[in-house]
Image (cartoon, rainbow, N blue to C red):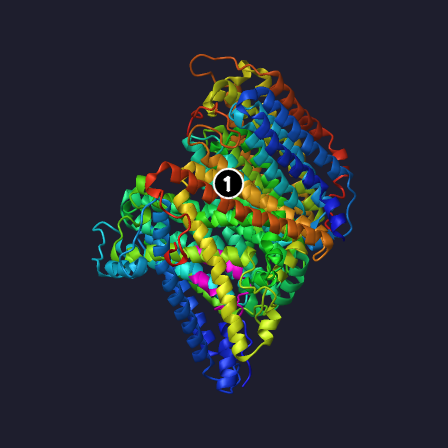
Amino acid sequence: MKVPLLSAMVFWAFAILAMASAVFVAFSRNIVHAAFALLGCFFGVAGLYLFLSADFVGIIQVMVYVGGVLILFLFAVMLTGKIRNPEKSNPSRAIPGGLVTMLVTLGLFGYLAFTTPWQVLPTVPTGPTTSQIGDALLGPYILPFEVASVLLLAALLGGVLLAGGVRGRSRLTGNEQDEAPRDSGGNT
Amino acid sequence: MTLTQSVAGLLPELCVLGALVLMLFLDLLLGRKDIRDPRSTGQILTAVALVGTGLAAFFVVRTPDLPGVMFGGMLALDPFARFFKLLFLIVAAFALVFAAMSEEIPRARLGQYIILLLTVTFGMCLLAGSRNLLMAYLSLELVSIPSYVLAGFRRGDRRTSEAALKYVIYGGIASGLSLYGFSLLYGLTGSLDFRELITGLTNLAYSPQSKLVLIVAIMMSLSGFAYKVSATPFHMWCPDVYEGAPTPFTAFLSVGPKAAGFAVLIRFVQTALGGTLEPVIPWPQLIGLVAAATMTIGNLTALVQRNVKRLLAFSSIAHAGYLLMGVSAGTDAATRAVELYFVFYLLMNMGAFLAVQAVRARTGSEDIDGYRALGSRSPLLALILAVFLFSLAGVPPLAGFIGKFYLFASLLETGTMFFYGLAFVGVLNSVVSLFYYARVVKAMYLKNPRGKAMPVPLGPGYSVLLLILAVPTLVLGVYWQPLINILSTAAGMAH
Amino acid sequence: MDRWDGGDMKELAEWVIRDLFSKNPDTWQYTWAIYLAGMALAAVICLGFVAVFAGPVTWVERRTAGRIMSRIGPNRVGPQGVLQWLADGIKNLLKEDLIPDDADKPLFRLAPYLVFSGMFGTFVVLPFGANLIAADLDIGVLYLMAVTTLVVVGLLTAGWASNSKWALYGGIRSAAQLVSYEVPIAFALLVVVISTGSLSTQAIIKAQGGWPWQWFVAKNPFTFIAFFLLLTSAMAEGNRIPFDLPEAESELVAGYNTEYSGMRFLFFLFEEWANLWIMGAITTLCFLGGWQIPGVSPEKISASSGWTFVGWQLLSFAIFAAKVSWIVFIVIQARWTLPRLRVDQLMSTCWKYLVPMTLVCIAGVLFMDLYIVQGGITDKIIRWIMTLLGAAVIVLFFLRARYNYKMDKDKYPGLRNEKMWYPPYRMP
């Protein structure tokens, strides 16, 4: 199939953006720069989603990952002390082992990706997908959808519980805490 | 099946969820500063949660089997799922009582603990019925994420934080690996449904070029489950988490999520990999090898442990190995043996951790040295703990022996050389395990205490609970036939 | 030659290919070039518009501030000071571009562009008139939400890269604030989306009508409340007083842009003023009927041709711009009227008041949509009541302004000879 020039250009732009940023994230010694490079990665992936005519998913990718995950990453990274010192924050350890793992996984998955007879879905014309996704979420996938909301609730509660101890007060109930850290016996 | 019928089949989970939501509000209302009375608040919250789980258990027993699958193939309500749901609810009920008795869970935060515990229970119940990769993954996460928080529940304790962090990191890696595996399976077959997976995979399995990708996909998919059941090589989190987490949660973790992992693993291998794939992709051998490795590593490492919680952690890894043998055999008899083993394992392992909790509550120690001369300091506690430990080791005439007997028997029934060998490894391991269980017993009865021997008084609550767990361990060891009768249909899975 | 009846730039490009070049857009080999040209054209038009809007509005704001504070404001450059913005712009361009020595230089340079592109990206889906829109995306409203997140990243970058504690505080505050206020905004937009059944901005406008009682703000009590919630949250999202904590000068010097100067500083200011238009455009298109011309249906506009068509487009643009300007003026006035919130007040306003209220609005709108027949008698009565309520709010606004003016006039002798309303040529 002949791919129109513009489509090819857009595809390669997004693909290169995603890949280059990902490589930068992996190899940058400066964690803050790596976190910022994720921005490009997320946008590249979102672009690829759009390219697959999954407009809703693509936009949600930007909203969730850039608007939520990346911001939280940046918060965490920026509020960590001595983060600018790569010796402390990002030391290189076990380079040979990592290299071998990387090459093996790369080779294996690259080989698999090109030799496997994947199930190919019929190409559908690009078009709005939002309403179809909505129907699917409230139709066949209603249970996973609801369970996912319980999961998010649990994660939210967990986050509050873990973070709420800063002032020695329980945020969920507003109670003073009556716990004292206590060492638990011996060690191995 | 219509949505209404599906929801009716989901009643037990909805009870747990209802209790959870109620608990959120109760915790907020009763926890207010002006009307705060931690003790009675804790009792009320525990009672509400127990009523919720009790109601759920009632519905599990009462609802008839549904012929089809619920929610368009997401969940199954078959005897297999119902057995495991009941098991989870019992474990949760015990864990709730343990938590209410423990001093490791601060009273004021008991509500939060219960909420998270109920979330895990909800996830486990869903996991037992999941027959779709999407549902299985979501339920796995629903079990995992609150567990991370519960493992780190004691704030300001370095070891607890370390435990939680290790749990999260290992969990994240395992979950990522399995998600990648699921995506490969989806890419190969275009479906997430277990039943549709097997037809798709079987069609593929005979073409030589897809054999490698099938093995990779299946191994990666299994890694998420392997992490939940703490099978090698995903067992490393286990000792640290068991040691660092609050003891009541360790007790829960060692039985509940592990059983949940086994439930979904058994369903996955039997319905999604099934028998037709076996000649091409030797998954029973694969799981069998993992089982042998898991129990050997667990038992050998347990030999050198000095902390009782760590020791029990390695023992639980070893038990995961025994149970994995049953999974690898893949017959109905083996499934029933696994279920039977879990009933016994619930009794003895929860009991052992309760005893550890009782000792810790009085002496503050979790070391084997802290158990010196427990036989004279607290005769009942020492006796019951010895019963649990010997049962875990599989010494007749205790329940653990019966469990192992059925497990090995189901392996031998298959009649292949591989499973004979596997059973032999299992028996060898049981012998090894006797050493370290006996070390604790030896410390309790044959060693003199270091320093002054303080008596360890046992409160009425602990005594009653320990007896509730210990008596069945003894009785079922000699008279187990009723349990076999109950379990006779429990291996059935919906198609 | 065929009429251009398209909705957005893509269709314009296709029309150009089909009718000017007489080629099939699907097969012609230079289609991509026309597409690219269309994109560039849309970008240039939007950029020009933003510049022309953001500049003068600074002057409007400063004159309004002067009026509210009983002083004059800029009135030297050009008649009544209308060219002040040009002078300021040139001054900023000529200033030395300073980068602090210890700053994280690449990020420091990058930040203004991130902020600017996040702001500018929204113009893709913001309509200007009946057929004047860069791209009528099917997921328009979601796209709006998504692309503005880039602004957050940019502000956070600016704050961190400056290597100054004031800037870092400002950056972190802005990130916390923007991320939080995105939630009520999204929920308030959801109210509109539920009423429309589409995420496309043009579809939202077309679901309303030209007359005030056909607007979503008057649809039912819940949309009425949602309008004010959206306006409030949008002010916070745009870092406007009373929510301008990221740049609270009394605490943080100038917040995230403390270390910036010259052109880069101008980018931040530019973003802020352009944001006024975005804010106004979003509220207008969601609740105030957008560019709808009273008495003229969108079908009639697209059925017309030639100069009539152009005329309708211009009229719709004028109506849209008038509504947006009105909102912008309210926002400006709020800035010089209200005191700044504290950080904890800011957060509790969002999470304890706005978010629950928007959730109630969503539930209410769902209920109303289920039980009230569109165009039925109940619907009409509710719409009329809401319209009157809206009118009452506006009347109250003017009465209140008049009352305050009179109070001040008695207190300050300097005001004694001033008229309350300026003559039109001196406005504001």
Horizontal placement of C148 versus B126: left or right?
left
C299 up-or-down from C243: above or below: below
In this view of the protein, can residue B397 be seen by the observer?
no
Q: Nearer the viewer, residue B484 or A60?
A: A60
**Other-residue count near label 1 (Cα within 10 Å), few / some / many at <14 / 14–19 / ≥20:** some
Percent coordinates x, y for residue C149 in the rendering: 44, 54
**Chain at tag 1:** C
Q: Which residue is pictured at 45% across the width and 70% down the height?
A: A11
Q: Is residue C315 visible?
A: yes
Residue extending farthest front: C417
Q: Is residue B79 above or below residue B367?
A: below
Residue A41 coordinates in the image, percent (x, y): 41, 60
**On the picture, is B301 further left or further right than C76?**
right
Report whether A141 appears left or right of C23.
Answer: right
Marker count (numbered)? 1
Residue visible at 29% across and 57% down in the picture: C264
Q: Is residue B52 magenta?
A: no
Q: Secondary structure at mark 1?
A: helix
Residue C226 spot, x, y in % from top left? 56, 48
- Residue named by callout 1: C351
- Quadrant of the image occupied by residue B42: top right
C123 in magenta: yes
Give the residue furthest to the bottom.
C22
The residue stretch that appears in magenta: C121-148
In the image, what residue type sits under mark 1? Answer: Trp
